[in-house]
Image (cartoon, rainbow, N blue to C red):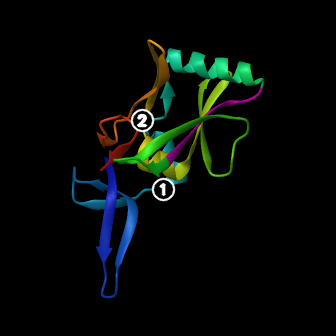
Amino acid sequence: MSYQPLFIKNSRRIIQAPFIALDTTETMSINIFKPEQDIKNLPPITLTEAALNHVRMQIKKQQKGIGLRLRIKTTGCSGKSYQPEIAETIEADEMVFQVAEDVVVLANKTDYLLYLTGLVIDFQKQGLNAAFKYSNPNEKGACGCGESFTVA
C-alpha cells in the first residue's frame, strides 16, 4: 500500500489530505493514514557502524548527549539540507529511533514523514574531509555541491 497526498475538491475550496492510502488490489478503497497507528510500519532512520561510532565519539567528547538530532532546513540550490547535531534531550513532537543501546536518532515527526522515511546515515572520511553522508530513498535530486536536496 502506498501513501500519497490526495487533493479533494469541493464547491468552495481544495482540501489537502496529506497522507491517504490507496488500495487498488480489490475494489477501490481509501484508508486515511493514522500517524500514531501507522507510523510504526514506516521504515526507520538508521545509522551505519561508522556513523554510530562517530556519534558515540562526539557524545564522549562533549561529555553529554543521548544521540543524533537531524533537522531539515530550507536552504541551498535544491531546497532542503540536513542539519545534524548532538542531542542532549528529546524535544516535543520528536520521533525516537533507538539505533543502539546507548544512542538514539531524533527527528521531528513532520520532517520524518515528509523527508526522512527510510534514511540511512553514514560517516565517511576522505583525505582531510569527514562528513555524514545520507542515503535517502525520498530524494529526487541534489545540487552539484551536494549541500542540498529535493524530494518529490
Viewer-side residue, 10 vs 63:
63
Q: Is residue 38 visible?
A: no
For badge 2, the amino acid type reads: Gly
Residue density around tag 2, few if under 14, some if 14–19, many if 20 or more, within 10 Å: some
Q: CA distance from mark 2 to mark 1?
A: 18 Å
Q: Secondary structure at mark 1?
A: loop
> Mark 1 — residue?
34
Residue 53 quadrant = top right
Label disc, if present, on residue 118 of the rendered structure: 2
Residue lying at the far right in this picture: please name it.
63
| Residue 13 placement, left or right of 89 | left
Residue lying at the far top in this picture: please name it.
127
Q: Residue at x 74, y 25 (%)?
A: 62
Viewer-side residue, 108 vs 81:
81
Residue 137 location in percent, x, y?
Answer: 34, 36
For badge 1, the amino acid type reads: Lys
Q: What secondary structure characterizes most of the magenta part?
A: strand
Residue 128 location in percent, x, y?
Answer: 48, 14
First to last magenta residue range: 64-72
| Residue 1 placement, left or right of 40 | left
Residue density around tag 1, few if under 14, some if 14–19, many if 20 or more, within 10 Å: few
